[in-house]
Image (tube, rainbow, N blue to C red):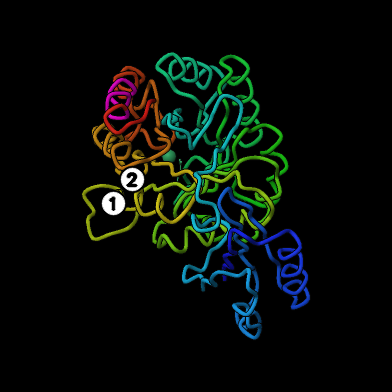
Amino acid sequence: MIIVLRPSATDRDIQKLVVRIRGLGLSPHVSRGKERTVIPVIGDDRVLATVPLLSYPFVEKVLPVLAPFKLVSREFHPKTTLVRARGLLVGSRRVAIIAGPCSVEDERMIIRIAKAVKRAGATALRGGAFKPRSSPYSFQGLGEEGLRYLAAAREATGLAVVTEVLDTRDVGLVARYADVLQVGARNMQNFELLKEVGMSNRPVLLKRGLSATLKELLQAAEYVVSRGTDQVMVCERGIRAVEDYTRNTFDLNAIPVLKELTHLPVVADPSQATGKWSYVHPMSLAAVAAGADALIVEVHDRPEDAKSDGEQSILPVRFAALVKAVRKVARSVGRTA
Ligand code: PEP
Ligand code: MN
């Protein structure tokens, strides 16, 4: 439930209400805006319904939150949240571009690709050290060794490092090396992991699950944010639909819908969404036109030898062309890149 106060509400009024709500065992989160104060209340709405809130003259209205998420909703926080990690800034007018290989394969390779994507205009480096592979026989990533190589690539380029964490037991370890923790599609509803990354002091890039609705994605984001951080990005990376010509179906609708529902910045991953390198360029442009705050793109300089996702990885030269095209599209929708 969200309690909207009249502009005339005083600090004493707010305090009175907060004490009453706490007395019911619920948690009020007072949010003071320029125009008015709103108080989203976390807990069982039925308990709050026993209080005649509108009898307080300083209460303007009480909104039952139909969406089962509050802290991540735009109603709660109308302005888009800025997520920061070193030089990476997501949620501003400027579209951020995160790029790099699917997996870290060795030190020279990640440094080489990091330099190439930086030169082309990337603002952060991606690369998996812990890989969630569909088959247990596929390359599972280099683990901590891969994290060390990512840190070396950051050292060489200054780019912020985005990498996935698969397991609650590794959150501390990954947070020591990475600037942003990625929670992958397959872990979107790993609630223990969501709580743990929410307490890691690192921004989180949360991917939409393979068959998750946007409501479920935002509920997952709510888990992270409820741990006390607002540094969360939500990412559309394609879903399972009837079409199987492409690896997944890129849900372009998700971008404007998420922009409307949440203040968290929205990232698009055209690489996992299409599964084929030749579709990454057009779908990146579509995502930016639709309002994405950032792209995360797989880039590899020898895709034919890649240990994972070579088919969907673009060459650095194509990535450089993509960045140029993204800048044009960004400008046409009132943004930069
Ligand atoms: C990836 O980014 O390489 C990845 C495995 O992503 P997802 O979790 O979206 O499949
Ligand atoms: Mn991948």
Q: Position of residue 99 (x, y in %)?
A: 44, 28
Q: Residue at x 68, y 38 (%)?
A: 175
Q: Nearer the viewer, residue 93 or 167?
A: 93
Q: CA distance from mark 2 to mark 1?
A: 6 Å
Kind of element beneath mark 1: loop
Rendered image: mark on residue 249? 1
Q: Residue 329: within the magenta?
A: yes
Residue 85 position by quadrant: top right
Q: Quadrant of ligand 2?
A: top left
What is the count of numbered marks?
A: 2
Which residue ends up furthest to the bottom in the rendered image?
A: 50
Residue at 62%, 37% in the rendered image: 143
Q: Quadrant of residue 173?
A: top right
Please report the residue visible at 40 percent of the width from the left and 25 percent of the height from the top: 300
| Quarter of the figure that contains the N terminus | bottom right
Q: Earlier in the sequence, mark 2 or mark 1?
A: 1
Secondary structure category for the residue under label 2 = helix
Q: Residues within 10 Å of mark 1 (few under 14, many from 20)?
A: many
Point out residue 88 in the picture as x, y percentages from the top left corner.
Answer: 54, 28
Report the magenta residues as a range: 323-330
Q: Which residue is mark 2?
A: 273
Compared with 44, 293 (above or below) is above
**For the point 28% across and 34% down, which residue is it?**
285
Report x, y in % for residue 129.
57, 36
